[in-house]
Amino acid sequence: MRKIASKGLFLAIALGLATLAQAQYSGVVVDAADNSPLPGAVVKAGSVTAMTDMDGRWSLDVSAGTELTASFVGYVDKSLLLGEQKNLTIALRYDKAASTLDEVVVVGYGTQKKSNVTGAISSVKAEDLEDLQLPRLETALQGRTSGVQVLQNSGQPGAASVVRIRGTASINGSNPLYVVDGVVIGGGIDFLNPGDIETIEVLKDAASAAIYGARGANGVIIVTTKNGARAKGMEVSVSSYTGVQNAWKQLPVLNAREYATIQNEMAAAAGQSIPYPNAASYGEGTNWQSHVFNPNAVMRNTDFSISGATDKGSYFSSVSYFDQDGIVAEGKSNFQRLSARLNTITKANDRFTVGWNVAYTHNESQSVAENTEFGSPLGRALNMDPITPLYETDPTALSQTPYTSGGVLRNNLVRDAGGIYGISSRVTSEIVNPVAAYLIENNYGWSDKIVNNTFAEFEIAEGLKARTSMGIDLAFYGGNGFRPSHYLNATNQLDTNLVYSNFNRAFTWIWDQTITYTKDVGDHHFDGLLGHSAQEVNGRYIGGSKRDVPVNTYDGATIDYARNVESQQVYGGYWERYAIESYFGRVNYDYQGKYVATAIMRADASSNFGSNYRWGYFPSVSAGWNIHKEDFWIYDNVNTLKLKAGYGLNGNDAAGSLEYASTIVGGRSYTFGANEVLVNGTAPAQVANPDLRWESVSQFNIGTEIRAFDWLTANVDFFNRVTNDMKTRPPLPDYIGNDAPTANIGSMLNRGVDIELGYDKTYTPDFRFSASANVSFLKNEVVLLGNESGYLPGQQWGPQGLEITRITEGLPIGYFYGYQTDGIFQSMDDVYAHTGGEAGDTLQPGAVPGDFKFVDVNGDGEITADDRTFIGNPTPDMTAGITLDMQYKNWDINLFGQGVWGNQIYNATRRYDLPTANMTGAALDRWTGPGTSNTYPRLTSQDDNMNFARSSDFYVEDGSFFRIKSLQIGYNIGGDAADRLMLRKMRIYYAGTNLFTFTKYSGFDPEIGAGFGVDRGIYPQARVHSIGLNITFK
Amino acid sequence: MKNTVKTTMRSMVAIAAAALLTVGCSKDFLNTKPVGRDLEINYYQTQAQAFEALVSVYDVLQWNDQYGFTMYRFLMNVASDDTYAGGSDASDQPSWVATDNFSWTPNLGPQAGFWRKNYKGIYRANLFLEKIDGIEDASVAFKTRTKAEVHFLRAKFYFDLIRSFGNIPFITNTLDPSEYYTINQVGPEVIFPFIVAELEAAIPDLPTTVPSTELGRVTKGAAQAMLARVYLYMDDEDNMADVAALCEDIINSGVYSLLPNYGDIFTKAGGWSSESVFEITYSENSTSDWGRFGSGHSEGNVGVQFCGMRDYNGPDYSPGWGFCPITEDLESFMDGDPRYQHTIIDADNISGAEYTPGYQNTGFFMKKYAPLASQFPPDGEPALNWGNNIREIRYADVLLMAAEGLVRSGGSEAQARSYLNQVRARVGIQGLGSSGNQLLEDIFNERRMELATEGHRYFDLIRTGKAANVLTGWQAHNQYLPIPQNEIDASQGALTQNTGY
């Protein structure tokens, strides 16, 4: 190559001097295999470039003797010297390896050839997503890239997912940074229509993410939306699917007969009278789950897009509508998204390009409470007694309390065409009739969002480009709600209805300027980037509520219509501004493509910090060695072997506005006067900490990329990620009287291995099989919190605030905390034999057979709160995904599975504080006498041993699961039929989502993104069967 | 081509200009101004701001949510022989159960809440006193009165601390970070004289009465009664004449009188009646919810929710959580007294009503602060929005303190009997003619009867030395709560734990 180039140069000079005159060369670029034309190929000679048209044709005015190079993505470049021959047919050879190596990867403010990438970046391409059903962006990442853990918060339509890149880096929020077409997106990425996505790149290591500096610590997800490709000409596509969703699992709970029997047993054990003398007479009772789940809920999506390109530019426009009903609480849980997008790029002239991406999205949703023990439809369905009827029809019952008040039937009982909803006289507190409770819920959310990015790019000189872009993210969003007058039970009632509403506007602009320069000096290739960026976020909000609307339904209920003027409440204001200003630079260097290196430096100044630490500096370096390009590399079967390593520093500026300052806040109020007026008081919120700064994450990454036999790929990365300066609130003594500020004290460690394997082979022209798998191993540890006690309190459970998780130094974040049990006392002898401490005291003198044997962890001879310890970890040790893809003639099958291993789930679905709450079928295997159970204790209304009222490993279950997330079987209509219909592509398919789940977890769903592994009654993922159609017109 | 060059040049200039404009954003670009709040360095400039700072000191009086449910007067009932802990079961509120049976440990009990609340109050009081003199905008009259109020409030915070903890950091200024871990932990011998001095400083500058819009602000009578209460608790016979004098000053002021009907005291209308010397006020209108619980900004009285009958369904009352069930001892002690029916709910004998018996259920519940259906909070989370004011100092208490002060200082026993018998006559029971120690005993008995379940009994037992005999499980070291372990941990060795813990 080098030889040719220098020879070319010599010839060019020689011939150029001789003939100087330019001539027109033209020709066609074809595929060497079948001589079919390659439209969109690039033909370059000297400083002029041409792109082949639909027929593969090109033409250039150049001097003879110039070296011409033709290239096309996926094909091996071909160079030749121009001579006498003016009409040239250039045949390019397709190369699988080249097709991968020539891929470019979006790296933030630019792209890079995949072979030159030295950081850990995972890519998801449009072709991987093309035929999938993706309700949201996160689903596109789920299980498809290593090192990225995606768990859906819940199955509620519109629910977001928890995305963690290489673990949880901070106790202060570990959400990755989302960048869509160059615009940093705040407030979630609901707006993005997954059908618009061209590629997703995940910057996992610090060396890559350093280009996003103070916001890169949790990894960066860069989304690039589609644009027209010239090679394809104008393309019109329609894709649509309709699915039917159902709960994949109902939990076995006690039926009425079993419930009554066990309640009798509990009362007897506590020495109380039997509440249900004739337990057998209650039969099956009410199956609350069947009333709460919404069978055959519909989900549908339609995308329509037009795209294309000319030599003057390209365009992509789309309209999409997505509509999903929830599988819980019919009519009260759903999500709709309408989105439209226009992307255009125009080449104004040879040097000047302008472009515009604009997307508008309208969302509407309705939601019910979920994952709370204080009243969610499913939580209630599990805890409500099965004796209470769905509708109370017994006239005697309806003539008494609680249906009556003062002898008169209450006018605010929940009722519909079926009658009056039953009220439990057994289970109390928030556990009310689950159906009646969701019927009165009216929680509506909406948003209108416009995300726009306008850019201009100018080629100042060869290899030197300047670009400026202005991104706008304008979002309006809000909620409306209505609480009708109702009576659910004594503690859940409302006499006068209430209507409320809120309205918010968020506005972000981000202005980037970059200059890039590319230079080849002999075999040395340099490219560099210098940039400046500024961003500002502002917001406004207003909301209010009022009571006594003349109608008792959501329809028609408005604040203005409500009559009770005194009850009117209003609030509003605007946000404290957020601004960030940054300078950044990047240098890429490679020598013959063998040795590659990247260095990045970014400086960020965030308004979240005071002047002491306003600026942060985030450097990174990385290098790679493409061993297969060395002359000594003789193993032809191994097409690619790359080693790479990188180290860098990223930041996390997730502090509150003015968190570093001492501010005087209101609401420190007191009531004065005969009329009980609440008078506002003010006091300092906290001690100032002018040294507050960003958290920093330093990460070392070492990895390898291998491609062999043209069909096997393997990427392995090891990482060590240390979070320093993690913001904690080290406790100050309370006698100081003012609250402690946050300070950069803590540290956290995430360490692991990411592995991606791929297999892709075309056996015959009719049969292609590919498989890819990714596995990640992760270990998380909270290293330092910087307080005396060494722990921070975590989650609580139940009205008594049982402490069930903690964050403790030396242990994984948010681990489950409680007592260890060591089986169940089978006899009094067991009780006496359970001794501890130096004196050998009986540890649980009050216990009786059937009670839990708690472990005296600290060995002090007593079971006390100090014996609570680590009883489980919500973070998986291993996450994996696998995709199998098969194409045979016109048929294709795609199977995708995902799983996590080594984590636990805290099953907090039963209200342990309510002895009359219903139980799952596990209670049927309770301890009833010696030898009956060593895992489920006796049941009693007087739980003196606190078998259930203590957080213990009894509630902790194996959370591992593997799930067939999706299976698609498609049929492509091709050939003449397609031609006659002017179709480029038409595919009809069946898709099944969440078809099989393999888990030991006993709850509704092991996929719990929300709540950090604590299941308080999760809204499970739906199992979906759907049929879809993808059509692309010529 | 010429055109292209021109356009290109223009574009270049535009881009360069744009780059220059933003490169090096102005310094203000990165400065965020506070919205809806102020920077401390810019505050405490006006009388209005000083008043808001004053309100924030008052605010602490009503706190009952620090480190869990730490309602002071209700927990003092639990500690005394008036009520048990109660709740749904033994594990409902461990710190309440520990208060009931004196099984406090440095980690278990209400101490962290009491400690934090009062030191928050002291901090705000110190801050106010540091700032007020420098506020040129404020009038002298304003400064004089508000400073007196803050001295009263700081005295009350210290009084509640020293009674509960015995050995406490003595802090009279806002601490600089350099002082955080060098504080002095001192005992009653330092704190009580300080409290007395605070109250003596406040009394002359406080108004005798306040307009109805200012009810809740400290009056002279409140400060005098507080000082009398402090002297009684100090239990030094040398101060008893002062107790009598302070109380008689209140009595002779003519501002206060007993309500004719004992049952009216704890009704809504009985708030700030002629019998109220000082109340701690709560609001039913702050729309508090659980999200605010623990922050001190929950302005309702959650104690009311606590002491209601569990899952109650019947007339008059709203359901509560079954805490503070009346002890058999108090029930039988009050049996036959006219005040019984206004103090104790006989839950098992309300016609047409049912409730769920909880832990330590006796069937008897507190009536004075019971959740009434007629006062059900209009908004927010009901449990957190009960508006019932705590009757912190009642005139009846003043009369009984006056009587005690007279007897113990060797003053007129006839006058003392007259005060005692005013309290008895109000509920239509016969006066007593006792004298000497018997008279003192009668006064103590009357205190229990008159002030039952109002949260005074426990410290009355302590100051009279009866706690060990009367309270099951009480040992001498229980006079003081343990210093909260979290506080000892955070103090970097500055604090010493109380003996016995």
Image: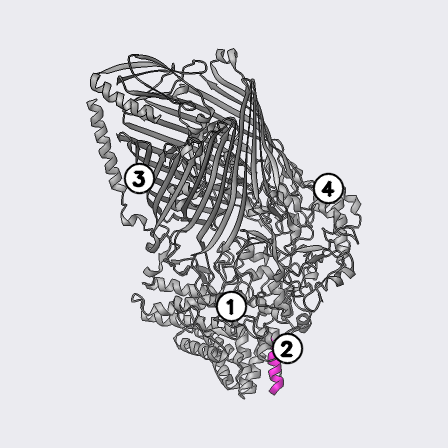
Mark yes or no: residue B146 visible.
Answer: yes
Residue to which mark 2 is pinned = B468
- Left or right, residue B374 beside residue A568: right
Q: Name which residue type carries label 4.
A: Gly
Q: Are marks 2 and 4 on the same chain?
A: no
Q: Residue furthest bottom?
A: B410
* Quarter of the rendering containing residue B329: bottom right
The residue lying toward the viewer, choosing from A530 and A960, is A530
Instruction: Select label 3 or label 2 by which is in front.
Output: 3
The tag earlier along the polypeptide, 3 or 4, is: 4
Tell me the CA gap for discs 2 and 4. Answer: 55 Å
Q: Residue furthest front?
A: A632
Q: Name which residue type carries label 2.
A: Ala
* Range covered by the magenta-colored residues: B434-447
Name the subunit of mark 4.
A
Q: Which mark is residue A530?
A: 3
Name the subunit of mark 2.
B
Q: Name which residue type carries label 3.
A: Leu
Q: Name which residue type carries label 1.
A: Ile
Q: Quadrant of the C terminus of chain A?
A: top left
Name the subunit of mark 1.
B
Q: How crowded is the residue under tag 4: few (<14 C-alpha within 10 Å), some, or many (20+)? A: some
Q: Position of residue A939 (x, y in %)?
A: 73, 53
Q: How crowded is the residue under tag 3: few (<14 C-alpha within 10 Å), some, or many (20+)? A: some
The residue lying toward the viewer, choosing from A562 and A538, is A538
